[in-house]
Amino acid sequence: MSQEIEVRSIEVGPLQANCYLLKCDQEGSAAIIDPGDEAERLVHAIKQAGLKPEAILLTHGHIDHANAAGALKDSFGCPIYIHPADRDIVERGESPVLWGLVRNHCTVDKEVADTDEITIGETKIGVLHAPGHTGGSVCYQVGSLLFTGDVLFKGSIGRTDLPGGSDAEMMQTLKTRISVLDGETLVYPGHGPETTIEHEKKFNPFL
Ligand SMILES: [Zn+2]
Ligand SMILES: [Zn+2]
């Protein structure tokens, strides 16, 4: 089902967020996770790889993950997905200038909920609601791959002190949603290098 999937990571913007390009089948049907900045560079990379984006999936609404979503939607005509709790922040919220970025608002097309499945080509992408960093944080799961946004990093976790964040929710998420996943699950975080659930359970003090 997901054997064909290819993942490419492109670090964008001043906060070095990871944008992931997922090639979901032989024809190049693709999903773009967290286009946070540098829209032109992303469009170029997507075209050069022969990808045909069918969805823009946001792990949460923060500017460093969502700021090029509107531009990519205009370029490829594909819908933007986000959890409803973070919808407002990408459509009209957050300071106009934050963390060195000027906010580009965008219009959300589809809301995601826990256990949803989004089909791109022949690949099914599962949605895991994982609040704590923001109320609408989600992880996207494709077979044994997990895209964690700012919930889980290699050796660390996302901040819980920003608006919509919650320590209690983060602890609950890590305990009931993340730690229970198969150890071999390959984790692609919103910042920094890849890891696995097994590695994090051994070395990450929060897990
Ligand atoms: Zn964030
Ligand atoms: Zn971030």
Image: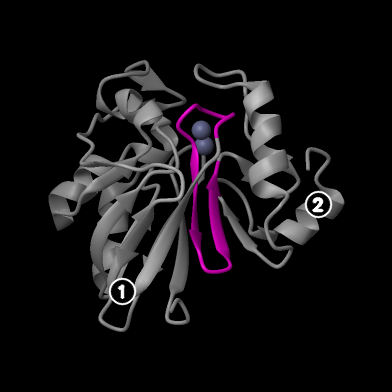
For the point 45% across and 67% down, the residue is: 8
Q: Position of residue 1 (x, y in %)?
A: 43, 79
Q: Quadrant of residue 86?
A: top left
Q: Amino acid at mark 2?
A: Lys
Determine whether the residue tagged by mark 2 lies in a helix, strand or loop.
helix
Please tell me how crowded label 2 is: few (under 14), some (14-19), or many (20+) other residues with Cα within 10 Å: some
Q: Which residues are magenta?
A: 131-149
Q: CA distance from mark 2 to mark 1?
A: 35 Å
Determine whether the residue tagged by mark 1 lies in a helix, strand or loop.
loop
The residue at label 1 has a CB less than 8 Å from ligand 2: no
Judged left or right of residue 50, residue 4 is: right
For the point 39% across and 27% down, the residue is: 85
Q: Amino acid at mark 1?
A: Ala
Q: Is residue 52 visible?
A: yes
Which residue position is annotated with label 1? Answer: 49
In the rendered image, the quadrant that contains the C terminus is top right
Which label lies toward us, 2 or 1?
2
Q: Is residue 23 visible?
A: no
The residue at label 2 has a CB less than 8 Å from ligand 2: no
